Image (tube, grey):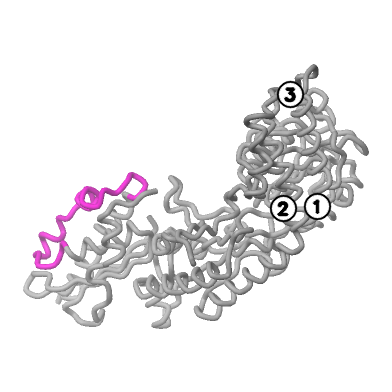
Amino acid sequence: MLKLPVFMDYHSTTPVDPRVLETMLPYFSEKFGNAASKNHSFGWDAEDAVAKSREQIARLISCNTKEIVFTSGATESNNLSLKGVAGMYREKGNHIITAVTEHKAILDTAKRLEKEGFEVTYLPVGTDGLIDLEALKSAITDQTILISIMLANNEIGVIQPVAEIGKIAKEKGIIFHCDAAQGVGKIPVNVDEMGIDLMSFSAHKIYGPKGVGGLYVRRKNPRVRLLAMMDGMRSGTLNVPSIVGLGEACAICEADMEEENLRLTKMRDKLQDHIMNALDEVYLNGHPEKRLAQNLNISFAYVEGESLMMGLKEIALSSGSACTTATLEPSYVLRALGVGSDLAHSSLRFGLGRFTTDEEIDYVGKRVVEAVNRLREMSPLYEMAKEGIDLKSVQWTEH
Amino acid sequence: MAYSDKVIDHYSNPRNMGSLDKKDKDVGTGIVGAPECGDVMKLQLKISGGVIEDARFKTFGCGSAIASSSLATEWVKGKTVDEAFQIKNTEIVNELNLPPVKIHCSVLAEDAIKAAISDYKKKNET
């Protein structure tokens, strides 16, 4: 039985996997100890649980257990990385390289560092959403101390060539930070093979609890140091239940990744085919292959995204239209791909996940086609296009 | 963001959605907005003896834009051209309970009425 509403916004967050929740629960009640209590079994139990979580995470990303710092999530990890490297290596240089399609958590921090005197290069992306490695190489100067590029994009799911970026960074002796909030647990990650020195991730994107995540900090070749963090420690009592949840979430991802990716790819492609076959003038945003199995981002010409979501209110989705925000600017990620503002306003992001069913895929596909057709009947742009009017040649009244 | 019941009603049951013959000299057509901004409204008025006999709209835009133009067609019908020209966007804001970020939708609707009237007048100058 199909249950409404349908959640198809898994890039924003995910429900806690029941298996994850089960492992967490004892640490709220009978095993409530402080992991820093060294003199009794309550403390030892908590410490053991944290150690196990470290091992689970370390296995998933192929690092050493000592290289993990627990944080409140990827946003904090991104902040610690950028500000920490900037502060620690300022003597070495003042140049940072990132990309225009990074998450706001990176871009806002980079903007802040610019105010403090750092130079930041924002690499452009191609129409497929990928950065150009040659452009990265030529952006490097003798002042470059940090490259920060995400693993997978939160809007279009595009997967950057992280291993190649890591190799370039290594050759030049530059620290490489990777925001992997959308990648860890979904695609294989090996920090050594990918040349990653710092990596941010969140539990709630991979069926773990909200408010916990981690930062991988390389300890060897080279040892990365961050200002404001003493010996890789973060202040505060460890949030043991959440840390347990993060570890278990990683372990499940590691075990199920291959099977889950096959299943989700099949479902995602089915949804994509259904929509593309039923409607004309719909456009896939981002690279057709180098993207997460969970992601589908499509622009529906002549239909505005927010009104489309209003017509699909029993389905939780996300749109590149920013009609609700104060700026009224559509998605900066889609704009960076060269998608016109009109099509950026017309985009929907479908985020599939572990609990998405075939029934939901069929339902969403059918409802999207209905809603788009209804709004196109209502759209003056669709009418004009059908009359053969070139919309680009029309003198619009800007407002 | 939660929509008001009136916006949802107009979105779900748009009034006077469609087109009139733009070549008819009794029909004034106003098209305002731009695709890049995420809103385009087309409002058409059929005018006879200085009175608006019929109105139609088509809108590309968010739910509030659709509701604003749907409401505008309801309001102008039966009004004289001069009366329709007096409709203010603030009246649309009040009727639909539009939040501040959606006020531009009501402005567009007011502009669309004025643009349609001016198109009619231009057609019938001679």
Q: Tell me, yes or no, if residue A110 can be seen here.
A: no
Q: Nearer the viewer, mark 1 or mark 3?
A: 3
Q: Amino acid at mark 2?
A: Gly
Output the chain of dot 1.
Answer: A
Tag 3's secondary structure? helix
Q: Which residue is mark 3?
A: A42
Q: Please give the label number shown on residue A344.
A: none
Q: Position of residue A31 (x, y in %)?
A: 69, 29
* Residue A18 visible in the snapshot: yes
- As drawn, the label of residue A189 is 1
Query: CB of mark 1 within 8 Å of CB of mark 2?
Result: yes
Whichever of callouts 1 and 2 sits on the residue coming sooner in the sequence is 2
| Residue corresponding to mark 2 | A183
How far is the residue under mark 2 from the one under mark 3? 35 Å
Indicate whether A295 appears above or below A32: below
For mark 2, give the secondary structure: loop
The answer for how far apart the CA atoms under marks 1 and 2 are is 8 Å
